[in-house]
Amino acid sequence: MRKIIHIDMDAFYASIEQRDNVAYRGKPLAVGYSGPRGVVAAASYEARRYGVRSAMASKTALRKCPQLIFVPARFDVYKSVSRQIMEIFHEYTNLVEPLSLDEAFLDVTENFRNISSATQIAQEIKQKIFETTNLTASAGVSFNKFLAKIASDQNKPDGLFVVKPKVAEQFVETLAIEQFFGVGKVTAKLMHQLGIKTGWDLKQRSENELVSIFGKTGHIYYQNARAIDDRPVESHRIRKSVSSETTFDRDIDNLEELAIILDEVAKDAFAYIDKKGFKGRTVTLKIKYANFKIITRSQTFANYITNYDTLYKAGYELLQNVDLSPKIRLIGLGVKNNENDIDWYDAIQLRINFEED
């Protein structure tokens, strides 16, 4: 049986800002832009007590917490700290699967220290992270990725939670459906409409029923409800999509103006495709309207996208068929490698935007 650890840093960006500036400590703080179109990238635990959350519009966050301190993001610093943390992980195993700058799965079934207890390893890693970065992390320990991911969120911040095999199914039955990894707001709303509010409710549904409602993801829900997750920790995951997007300073409904912005987004995405030799055949245009409704339009080609002109032309053709009312606030363009099924962690975001989907 595998021994899996999920490590998740506590309020990573905000905690780094508080670590590096004593004036921010103990105060509600948000990383992001406080202007009229600003969005919260990350919130300190002091800010979260007021209901401030990441992806929240800055004006909403300020209404909830008028004394909220905004600081600009410093991604070079966050990446540097992330490298320190990843180095600690690799002291124990090479089976490390980063999900983002501040979280990763580790398979420590066999490890460099020959420690039999995954819980002990998690404790050591948490301590080393604190000694090295002066930041806290939370850890979840279990026998699969699904359970370890949920466990790491149980006792935040600076928590450690273990889900053992004997109690795994019972533990899952008690979870709110929103706690299931991969269940977002839209899916949770649909599940509630179907009377599925907990893991126990989900477990009462047949696999065929879940597949008929949710497609192939229904297989995953069926297994997760039974504490089953056979996915290995993948230290070298294949990147399956590349995308770039930008949010406008004002809402736009002019096609020519949108085409100019699309040109910049396409150049941004193709620069990565060209540099890394990424191969994909499906071009996807993403549009977010002023009312925050999101639509996507896609076109799949027989051959890989190998030049900027093909990418831009495909995006522009898709844009021409998009309704420009209401006005548009965000445009994105991406290329997907659809040779294989897409897993939960396939998004590679080039230009980081903190927008609520």
Image: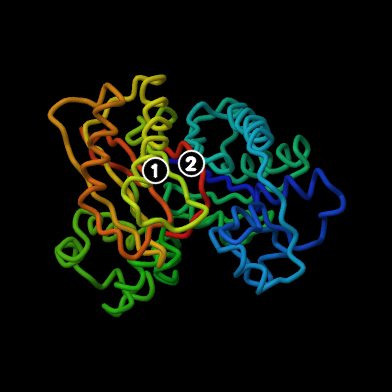
Q: Residue at x 37, y 35 (%)?
A: 263
Residue 270 position within the rendered picture, expressed as x and y whole percent measured from the top left: 37, 28
Which residue occupies the extreme right position in the image?
22
Using the image as rendered, state which of residue 9 and residue 219 is in the foreground.
9
Q: Residue at x 59, y 43 (%)?
A: 102
Which of the marked residues, 2 or 1, is nearer the chain's N terminus? Answer: 2
Q: Secondary structure at mark 1?
A: loop
Using the image as rendered, state which of residue 154 and residue 240 is in the foreground.
240
* Quadrant containing the C terminus in the rendered view: bottom left
Q: Secondary structure at mark 2?
A: strand
Label 2 and label 1: CA atoms lie apart by 7 Å
Q: How crowded is the residue under tag 2: few (<14 C-alpha within 10 Å), some, or many (20+)?
A: some
Whether 52 is drawn above or below 300: the answer is below
Please indicate whether residue 79 sits to the left or right of residue 192 in the image: right
Circle 2 is placed at which residue position? 99
Residue 189 position within the rendered picture, expressed as x and y whole percent measured from the top left: 34, 73
Circle 1 is placed at which residue position? 345
Residue type for callout 1:
Tyr
Residue type for callout 2:
Leu
Q: How many marks?
A: 2
Query: In which image quadrant can residue 261 be found?
Result: top left
Q: Identify the colour scheme used.
A: rainbow
Q: How crowded is the residue under tag 1: few (<14 C-alpha within 10 Å), some, or many (20+)?
A: some
Q: Residue at x 66, y 74 (%)?
A: 64
Residue 91 position within the rendered picture, expressed as x and y whole percent measured from the top left: 62, 27
Q: State if disc 1 and disc 2 touch (CB < 8 Å).
A: yes
Please indicate whether residue 54 sits to the left or right of residue 136 in the image: left
